[in-house]
Image (cartoon, grey):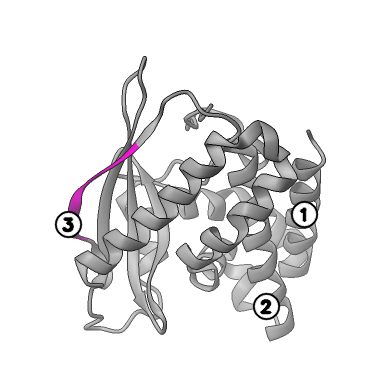
Amino acid sequence: MVEVPSPSLSAARVLSRRLMLGAAGAAGLLAVVAPRAPARAAAPDPAAATALIESYQAALLDVMQRADALGIRGRAEALDGPVRATFDFQRMARAAAGRAWRDAPDSDRAAMVDAFADYSVAVHADRFDGFGGERFVIDGTAPGPAGTLLVHTRIARPDDEAVPLSYVVAEGPEGPQVVDVLLKGSISEVALRRSEWAAIGSREGLSGLVTALSKLTARMLQAS
């Protein structure tokens, strides 16, 4: 059953257990989407962005309905392709790593992108571990900052309040991709990752952050 993350959880708990959501305001979101963005970046086509999210959420629902039979490793395998196709991990990893990214060689940057993607797939597999009648509903689109588009959705739950999620979609070389996920319109996952990982990056550099993420990923996939 899907469990909605709480911004009040400790950083360690969020790092290892929660869906890719966190706590940061609109200023944090701007820090994620604005760097190196073209001055007049074209927003994605709303129909294409909506189709991207529909495909991603359909994959989530399928895995949720088969969660027990698949197990966590099976869920990770089933979600690997859809998650990587949906999210721009190059852009997200750069924003989440902060200063450690700027000071790192290209080889460490490439390793960070891979580690971030692997970690994100594992978090999805860990979190979407059952089905209790949930539905994914798309509630339309709206302009976002720095040439992005917001795709507003919610997780409708039979016996609880719906959970609003907004996907920040940017146009990339191969079409639209998600660059951040917002809870309640302003809680930025990538900005939280940046604040959580700043100490590791400052102390151990980007290679140390890659090592920490790889350990977390392995731990999640061995948990059940």
Principal SS element in the magenta part? strand
Residue 88 appears at what percent x and percent y? Answer: 48, 69
Q: Which mark is residue 130?
A: none
Q: Crowding at label 3, few (<14), some or many (≥20) Cα neighbours within 10 Å? A: few
Marks 1 and 2: which is nearer the front?
2
Amino acid type of disc 2? Answer: Ala
Q: Earlier in the sequence, mark 1 or mark 2?
A: 2
Location of residue 96 (image quadrant): bottom right
Instruction: Name the image quarter holding the C terminus.
Output: top right
In magenta stretch: residue 141: yes
**Residue bounds of the magenta highlight:** 136-143
In the displayed structure, 38 sits above or below 4; it is below
Amino acid type of disc 3? Answer: Ala
In the displayed structure, 26 sits above or below 209; it is above
Name which residue lies at 31% across and 27% down: 162
Name which residue lies at 72% across and 38% down: 71
Relative placement, left or right, of 214 versus 12 is: right
Q: Are marks 1 and 2 in contact (CB under 8 Å)?
A: no
In magenta stretch: residue 94: no
Viewer can see residue 11? no
